[in-house]
Amino acid sequence: MLLLPLTAGAQVKKTYAFVERDSTLYLDVWSPEVPRSDKACVVALFGGGFVVGERDNSLQVRIAQQLTARGYTVVSPDYRLGLKDSVKMKTYKGLTDMNDMFQWVIDIATEDCAAALAWVVSHAGELNINPERVVLTGCSAGAITVLQLDYCRANSLPQAALLPAGWMPAAVVPYSGAVMCKGKPKWQTPPAPTMLMHGTKDKIVAYKRFPPVLSHALYGSATVYKRMKKAGYPVWIMRYEGIGHEVASFLPGSVDLFCGFVEQVFTGRRTTLDATVKDEKLVPTEWTKMNVFDIYK
């Protein structure tokens, strides 16, 4: 079902329904005026702590404008915000239950991401994209979701079951992301080449892991990088020194770095890089002072 075509400068946005859950989920497709010759596509998931956020918020629009200007088709999908389910939330109590709660919330978002990707791949001709050159990115909750999606795909977990057989993303670039699992992350088959973007002072999506006392935890970029590097997988990490959760919304400010990494992947360069970054465009704000309890209290 096609809805609401509109023109925005050099881009054209169209909105499609892609799956039925408790309600219909939609995705926006932003098409560039001049597509790349390889018809590459970026699927970008919004953030909001799994409780707020929209596929067409101002950050998503800026991301679409930045990337379509470089010839990418950009897809911004809905996903279920599990923390808005007040009835389900009341069934969880205590620290261990909190982890189970977050696992469920991340799982349903991951299932919806898989459904969106399955739709995108099956409509590649209509969208004028190359299904082998689909890059995943997201901010905060969206970053967790895209990183979790590739983790589930590599481990043949049911949350990724809707993905087409044998398909994998060309690259994954999470801004303040993490993997939720029991025990340290490990991959049965190789993950996609990944560039992890994270502030070293992030206490909302933990830079290392949260909670630190349980093995069933949210493992942040520092831990994911360490585990991927040890296993010999191509992975970059950009450690934004002294910065907190501000990194989550920094794709528009780091679009050249984003595109540079993707180009290296597309040309077959599968490398490992560990960089400590300072960027004058990114300074500490109140987000550096905040922690996960400030968000959900």
Image (cartoon, rainbow, N blue to C red):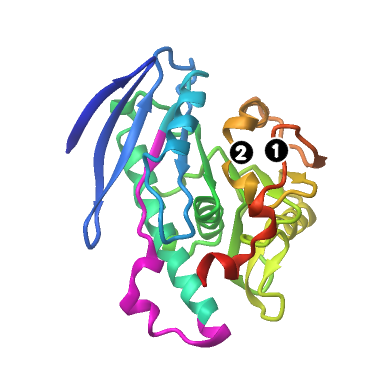
Identity of the amino acid at label 2? Phe
Magenta extent: 75-97
Query: Residue 200: x and y, percent?
Result: 76, 53
Helix, strand or loop for disc 1? loop
Badge 2 crowding class, 10 Å Cα cut-off, few under 14, some 14 to 19, many 20 or more, is some
Name above or below for residue 151 compared with residue 98: above
Query: Residue 258: x and y, percent?
Result: 63, 32
User: Which quadrant is the N terminus positioned in?
Assistant: top left
Q: Quadrant of residue 91?
A: bottom left
Tell me the residue that label 2 is attached to: 250
Tell me the residue that label 1 is attached to: 282
What's the mark number on residue 40?
Answer: none
| Front: mark 1 or 2 | 1
Query: Residue 28: x and y, percent?
Result: 33, 36
Residue at the farthest front position: 286
Helix, strand or loop for disc 2? loop
